[in-house]
Amino acid sequence: MLEYHSIQSLVDAAQEKGCTISELVLADQSVQTETPKDELFRKMQDNLHVMQEAVQAGVDKDLKSTSGLTGGDAYKMQQYAQGGGLCGSFFTQALTRAIAVSEYNAAMGKIVAAPTAGSCGILPGTILSLMEDRDMPEETAVMALFTAGAFGMVIADRASIAGAQGGCQAECGSAAAMAAAAMVEMSGGTPEMCAHACAIAIKNQLGLVCDPIAGLVEVPCIKRNAGGVACAFAAAEMALAGIKSVIPVDEVIDAMREVGDSMPCALKETAQGGLATTPTGIRLKEEIFGA
Amino acid sequence: MQVFDIIGPVMIGPSSSHTAGACRLGRVTRKILGDRPVKARIGLCGSFAQTYRGHGTDKAIIAGILDMHTYDARLRHALELAGEEGLTYEFYQTSIPGAHPNTAILELTGEKGGTCRVVGASIGGGNIIVTNINGLEVQFTGQYNTLIVLHQDTPGVIAAVTNTMAYSGANIGNFRLSRPQKGGEAVMTIEVDGDVSDKMISWLRELPHITGVVLVRAI
């Protein structure tokens, strides 16, 4: 059975067996939870479908969050994406998906926490984009979620996936790293390349603070989901090109933990610093909750 | 840790701790009441008290009390549905020194007149920890199928319960006993691996000195 303490050990195990990380993890989880593989696959497939439904619902023009602070930006992005945008419509559609799911979350819609609700747009923005716009089979996308989950388990074990504990690097940073690794596997990269993609994505978001306005999962969380998608693509592209992370992935995760531990409390989901305490941040909080 | 702890849960947003965890606290409390609730009094502490409106924490707790899951789309209309289902509720702000910032105190009254009081916290990622039931200290997370066995503190009761479980093939992952006073009301909190059969629960209920058995299913 796997222990999910280190990504290198997952890579080694996959290489030894000559399989992908997702195949390794699915087999292991089947043993650990005493559940047949096809049942676990179907459960993950259900999660993928919830992500697709959230994208559909989230691009609604009239969507509004409970606080009234956000909503409708995914629609704007979708309209803009039709014209292509600077990076082409594949990328702008990916951003649309990430914003749609995050906005739907803020509007009390049904989403898959991946790894958290605050970072729930990043995996849909990446994995669904490869599946739907690059015509990859659904099975490939479902398996990619197992890979993403495996990387997330190690990050949760060695560092954290909670903004309150590690800042936004632990939420959107982890999600981007999970997505980067998953996309590399979907694109035919080796387990080792997946590990480099994960490392590069975390390195590029190291130190990101969690400073939500009024403590709500809206500003800046929604846009940081779009940012996480961009980061995941950059990391996956580098890894697929054969670029390696100079610092090994497990050491990068340990660094993320150390950075999170030394981050002041005010910047860890308490809404007592950063964007939350800007004059506008304070004014918005007063408007929502009263002075 | 399991892969679905990371890719999951499927939930109604916006916050796993303030919405999904809050819903599960409500649902656990309803399970413990074991009746259709008609009255709820809910104290919110710390971060729960400060941000509950924007996060829909109030809707989520009421949804849980109405027996909804964290992924039930009706969650966002829970306050209106409470009226239709004959549930009156009241929220108040409070504080418990040293408690987790997302702690709630839930008091329910059932239609048959029974009551229960549960204290629990939402500790992140939709996970919860229940710390007190009817003044008795407990500790369970709801990550595993959990049996709450209320009983009179009498010699042999624990053996009878664990023997029955052994006979049913249930493996105990964690066991905790809370007994404020010798011979008084006591509670066993038993986390179980795998599924728990209805038959085993009915056998447990028939044992002497057992006053209540509640199964809180894992997510």
Image: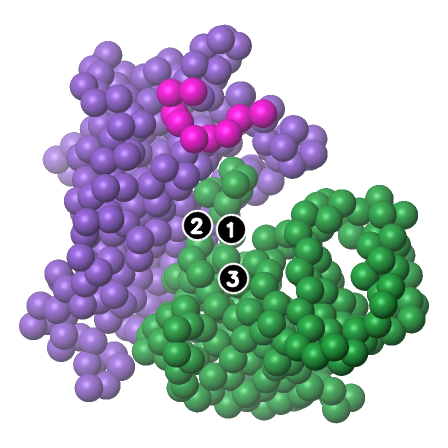
Chain colours: A purple, B green
Pointer 2 local density, CA inside 10 Å: few below 14, some 14–19, many at least 20: many
Q: Residue at x 51, y 52 (%)?
A: B10
Quarter where residue A69 is shown: bottom left
- Is A4 inside the magenta-drawn segment? yes
Residue type, numbered disc 3 = Ile
Frontmost residue, B56 versus A2: A2
Mark sitting earlier along the chain (1/3): 1
Q: Residue at x 43, y 31 (%)?
A: A5
Q: Residue at x 70, y 45 (%)?
A: B193
Residue annotated with mark 3: B128
In the image, is residue A12 above or below residue B62?
Answer: above
Point out residue A283 in the picture as x, y percentages from the top left corner: 13, 77
Residues shaded magenta: A1-9
In the image, is residue A211 above or below residue A44?
Answer: below
Disc 2 to disc 3, C-alpha distance: 16 Å
Disc 1 to disc 3, C-alpha distance: 13 Å
Mark 1 and 2 residues: CB-CB less than 8 Å, in contact?
A: yes
Q: Which mark is residue B9?
A: 1
Frontmost residue, A239 versus B116: B116
